Amino acid sequence: MARGKRVARRLGAWICFADESGISLRPARARTWARRGTTPIVTVAGRGGRKLSLAGIVAYRAGHEPRIIYRTMVHRGRKGEPKGFGEDHFADLLDATHQQLRAPIVLIWDGLPAHKSAKMRALIAARPWLRVYRLPGYAPELNPVENLWSSLKRSMANLARGRIDDLLRVAKNRLKRMQYRPTLAFGFLATSGLAPP
């Protein structure tokens, strides 16, 4: 991590952490209020096979407010439809991030096979403004984006969603709110035990 910070300082780059997650129509369980002696029941109308895939980046740079950038992908259970983000999707997300931040990027992410493939290595090599570092294996607690997903899923617990489009709408709404609260992004970094750049 320290090497990534030094490179970012030298290049005037943003330090970006990336990760992906998924949410299904089955809601996460959490504590809730109910009348004494009455167990709350959350009915779920969703069918299996449908899920929402999320890819997110939390970007930090000294002297700037942190940024949260994300992309969504809906899997409706159709044959031949991608179930998650592939190399091209990650490349599009990185290009959009670079366009928004208007500076070089030092990217830190995990060892997902799509992050290490030959195609991804070629896509990274074609972007001179990008430096990539990998998180150590089995260390998700070092990635602030994991805290972003945790916060998002906690805010959606016990929420009964009827259709996948409802899930998409609610997730985008919650993520948009997080984008306008930079203190949350600093909190995600602090929870991971890393110091701000």
Image (cartoon, grey):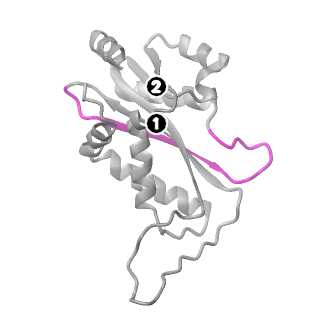
Q: Is residue 108 above or below residue 75?
A: above
Rendered image: mark on residue 135: 2
What is the spatial separation of the Cα atoms under label 1 and label 2, in whole angstroms?
8 Å
| Number of disc labels | 2
Depth check: 96 or 131 in front? 131
Residue 138: x and y in percent read 51, 32
Sequence order check: which comes first, mark 1 or mark 2? 2
Specify start and end residues of the magenta stretch as a single range: 63-84
Residue 28 horizontal side relative to residue 46, left or right: left
Q: Percent from the top left, x then y, of residue 147?
A: 39, 44
- Which image quarter: residue 141? top left
Residue drawn at x 55%, y 11% is 125
Q: Is residue 1 above or below residue 42?
A: above
Visible residue check, residue 87 = no
Mark 2: which amino acid?
A: Leu
Q: In the image, is 83 to the left or to the right of 124?
A: right
Q: Amino acid at mark 1?
A: Pro
Q: Which residue sits at x=45%, y=18%?
A: 133
Relative depth, front residue between 111 and 163: 111
Which residue is tagged 1?
140
Q: Is residue 98 magenta?
A: no
Secondary structure category for the residue under label 1: helix
